[in-house]
Amino acid sequence: MLRLAFLSLALAILSGILGLTGLAGDFAGLSLMLFGIALAASGTLFGLRALERRDERRCYN
């Protein structure tokens, strides 16, 4: 998921280099939105895994 975030950020930067008008600007906006979504999802999954590990330690100790 984190790879998707950085791939979409790279695409947004590339689109920004090409120009922020017309189709390139739309593509940059979509890429930045995907970056935000993927980054939020990876952070959420990381947090959930940390909570699972904490709960496992509490249950088995």
Image (cartoon, helix red, strand yellow):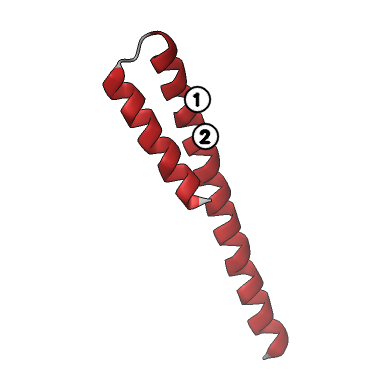
Three-letter code for the amino acid on which mark 2 is drawn: Leu
Q: Residue drawn 49% across and 37% down? A: 36
The answer to whether 28 is drawn above or below residue 35 in the figure is above
Residue at 72 percent of width and 84 percent of height: 59
Where does residue 22 sit, x and y in percent of width and height? 41, 8
Q: Residue furthest top?
A: 22
Give 16 or 50, whichever is nearer the viewer: 16
Give the answer, above or below, for where 37 lies relative to 42. Answer: above
Q: Position of residue 13 (x, y in %)?
A: 32, 30
Measured from the top left, where is residue 5 in percent x and y? 46, 43
Q: Are marks 2 and 1 in contact (CB under 8 Å)?
A: yes
* Disc 2/disc 1 C-alpha distance (Å): 6 Å
Asked whether, in this view, residue 2 is left or right of residue 41, the answer is left
Q: Nearer the viewer, residue 51 or 14?
A: 14
Amino acid type, callout 1: Leu
- Residue found at the very far right of the displayed protein: 59
> Dividing the image into 4 quarters, which one contains the C terminus?
bottom right
Q: Is residue 45 above or below residue 53?
A: above
Disc 2 is placed on an element classified as helix
Number of dots carrying numbers:
2
Callout 1: SS? helix
Disc number placed over residue 30 in the picture, else none? 1
Label 1 packing within 10 angstroms: few (<14), some (14-19), many (20+):
some
Q: Quadrant of residue 12?
A: top left
Residue 16 placement (x, y as % from top left): 32, 22
The quadrant in which residue 37 appears is: top right
The crowd level at tag 2 (other Cα within 10 Å; few <14, some 14-19, many 20+) is some
Q: Residue at image x 40%, y 16%? A: 25
Q: Which mark is residue 34?
A: 2
